[in-house]
Image (cartoon, rainbow, N blue to C red):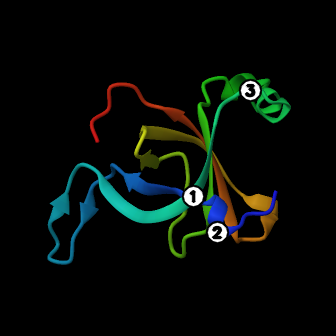
Amino acid sequence: MSMSYGKMNTFVDIITTAPVKDAEGFVTHGDTVLASVRAFKEVRNTSAKWEHIIGNAAFSSISAMFRFRKIPDVDVDTTLFISDADGRYNIVSAEDVRGRGMYVEVLAEKTEGSVK
């Protein structure tokens, strides 16, 4: 699937919950936004593509897929979270689309009872 800028119409924050040291050397706890980007979002449905993803038992809890441009100096992995207008998502899988270093595809599960 080719990604045009027009298809990336969901604004998301890439969040870490790890303690972060600020410029003065103080450690901050809680959520820290690493990047705010535009993303393509697809919510889980019954299409053949989703059946292929969900067919893998490890991905049975996936509720959304996000695709966005690679963010320089930010390695997106399963320790991070995604937040958008619909809520917060745990990242279950993150991979480079087609190995070109241009886009990242994230499979995520929606967290329940989270505070934005």
The residue where tag 1 is placed is 39
Q: Could you say where residue 100 lies in the image, as x and y percent from the top left?
A: 78, 70
Q: Amino acid at mark 1?
A: Ala
Q: Could you say where residue 70 lies in the image, as x and y percent from the top left?
A: 61, 68
Quadrant assignment for the N terminus: bottom right
Name which of mark 3 and mark 1 comes first in the sequence.
Answer: 1
Q: Residues within 10 Å of mark 2 (few under 14, many from 20)?
A: few
Q: Which mark lies nearer to you, 3 or 1?
A: 1
Q: CA distance from mark 3 to mark 2?
A: 27 Å
Q: Could you say where residue 59 lies in the image, as x and y percent from the top left?
A: 68, 29
Q: At x 54% / y 45%, what residue is drawn?
A: 78
Q: Splitting the image into 4 quarters, where does residue 35 fall?
A: bottom left
Q: Which mark lies nearer to you, 3 or 2?
A: 2
Mark 1: which secondary structure? strand
Name which of mark 3 and mark 2 comes first in the sequence.
Answer: 2
Q: At x 80% / y 63%, what residue is drawn?
A: 2
Mark 2: which secondary structure? helix
Judge from the rendering whether residue 11 lies leftward or rightward of residue 92; answer left or right.
Answer: left
